[in-house]
Image (spheres, rainbow, N blue to C red):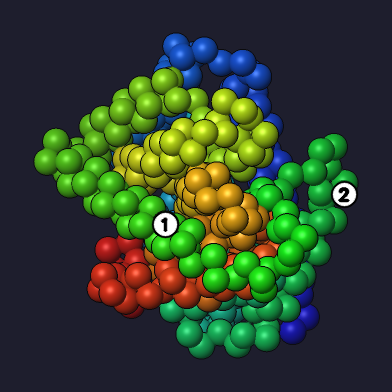
């Protein structure tokens, strides 16, 4: 128990530091106003760096980064450093992805170092890796139960109360570090507040945005599958595939700058920008963000999906609420975000536990409906048991 608290606290502290330096790197690369040419050249520079780094880790994803920590007795320093660099470059150069993978690569090496000192056997070393990741994700998402539940299929023997304790300690370490840093950093999903009528009275109306969110999630999966197949036909060389996907993403970002980054700040701006208030514009932005995420993930940019997926679902929910005046925007966004994330991530419980804490309006019932409809869509489409092309 003491080791779980200590490692969780350290993981949360390190997570805050990594996220802080990622943010500094991102701000250094991107001035407040960036023209189309600057956007194109910056994204392509990031793509070139990713293509170079992918020589050593051609197939790494966020899921495989988790799996490596749970499966290996000790992580090698070079692969961990490459994965961390991939995650940091992917975020810093404007990728439509979240920071999870880069953070997990650093925490994976930290856990491996700790397990080298106190791990007595393979099972205990795997548990240490699971504890480290629970602490990091619990801190990053601000959700101890969400951080503890992520990756449960990879480490089924990990005691749930111990992981929650580690994730809670991780959140404490994260908050402590943010208190000491010049400018705190963290993730949140901006959502309109729920109206005065309350959730219960408008609950039935949450079904429509949840269905829309599920459709948006399926559209993203089709886009990613199509992009992956197209790139595979183009070349067997991972570097060429990365450059090709980066070229398309760079052009998309140059014409539509809002598709860059994880979407947190762009979503905040979209909710108050009159130019984006039209429902057709919001739906268009939602689909373009889904395409940007598909290009980044298929093209080797390394990161987590939940933040950009939240942008996709939130923009769709806002569009539907604008079409249907009786639909509460806060409920529409929560339900749509939950369904979109559930369909793509295929972790209903984890999505619910994370969004309860990450969403700013805490519309728990609407989130639950969205997750339930997203899970039903997975079952109906036969995608329920798949994650990143693997069956668990």
Q: Is residue 196 visible?
A: yes
Q: Using residue 46 as the reference point, say whether residue 387 is left or right of it.
A: left
Crowdedness near tag 2: few (<14), some (14–19) or many (≥20) residues, C-alpha within 10 Å:
few
Q: Dot 1 corresponds to which residue?
A: 212
Nearest to N terminus: mark 2 or mark 1: 2
Q: Residue at x 48, y 85 (%)?
A: 156
Answer above or below: position of 271 versus 112: above
Q: Is residue 97 visible?
A: no
**Residue 325 % position (x, y):** 58, 50
Mark 1, secondary structure of its residue:
helix
Looking at the image, do the residues carrying marks 2 and 1 touch, with CB atoms under 8 Å apart?
no
Q: Residue at x 79, y 43 (%)?
A: 184
Q: Residue at x 54, y 65 (%)?
A: 205
**Residue 329 % position (x, y):** 62, 52
Mark 2, secondary structure of its residue:
helix
Q: Residue at x 44, y 57 (%)?
A: 213
Crowdedness near tag 1: few (<14), some (14–19) or many (≥20) residues, C-alpha within 10 Å:
many
Q: Dot 2 corresponds to which residue?
A: 179
């Amino acid at each position: 128990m003491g080791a779980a608290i200590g490692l969780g606290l350290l993981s949360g502290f390190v997570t805050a530091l990594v996220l802080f330096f990622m943010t500094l790197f991102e701000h250094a690369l991107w001035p407040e106003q960036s023209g189309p040419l600057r956007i194109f050249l910056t994204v392509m520079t990031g793509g070139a760096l990713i293509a170079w780094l992918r020589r050593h880790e051609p197939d790494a994803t966020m899921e495989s980064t988790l799996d490596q920590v749970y499966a290996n007795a000790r992580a090698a320093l070079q692969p961990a450093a490459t994965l961390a660099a991939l995650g940091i470059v992917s975020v810093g150069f404007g990728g439509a992805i979240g920071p999870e993978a880069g953070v997990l690569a650093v925490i994976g090496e930290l856990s491996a170092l700790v397990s080298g000192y106190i791990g007595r056997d393979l099972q205990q070393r795997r548990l240490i890796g699971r504890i480290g990741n629970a602490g990091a994700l619990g801190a990053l998402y601000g959700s101890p139960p969400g951080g503890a539940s992520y990756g449960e299929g990879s480490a089924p023997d990990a005691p749930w109360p111990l992981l929650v304790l580690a994730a809670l300690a991780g959140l404490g370490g994260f908050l402590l570090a943010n208190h000491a840093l010049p400018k705190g950093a963290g993730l949140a999903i901006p959502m309109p507040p729920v109206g005065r009528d309350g959730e219960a009275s408008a609950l039935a109306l949450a079904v429509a945005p949840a269905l829309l969110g599920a459709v948006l999630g399926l559209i993203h999966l089709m886009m990613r599958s199509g992009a992956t197949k197209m790139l595979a036909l183009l070349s067997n060389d991972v570097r060429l595939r990365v450059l090709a996907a980066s070229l398309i993403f760079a052009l998309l970002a140059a014409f539509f700058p809002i598709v860059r980054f994880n979407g947190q700040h762009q979503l905040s701006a979209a909710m108050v920008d009159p130019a984006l208030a039209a429902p057709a514009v919001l739906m268009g932005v939602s689909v373009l963000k889904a395409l940007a995420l598909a290009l980044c993930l298929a093209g080797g940019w390394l990161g987590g999906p939940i933040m950009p997926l939240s942008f996709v679902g939130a923009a769709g929910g806002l569009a539907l609420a604008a079409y249907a005046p009786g639909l509460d925007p806060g409920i529409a966004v929560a339900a749509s975000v939950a369904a979109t994330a559930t369909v793509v991530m295929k972790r209903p419980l984890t999505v619910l536990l994370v969004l309860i804490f990450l969403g700013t309006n805490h519309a728990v019932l609407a989130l639950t409906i969205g997750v339930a409809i997203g899970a039903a869509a997975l079952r109906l489409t036969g995608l329920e048991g798949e994650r990143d092309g693997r069956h668990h």
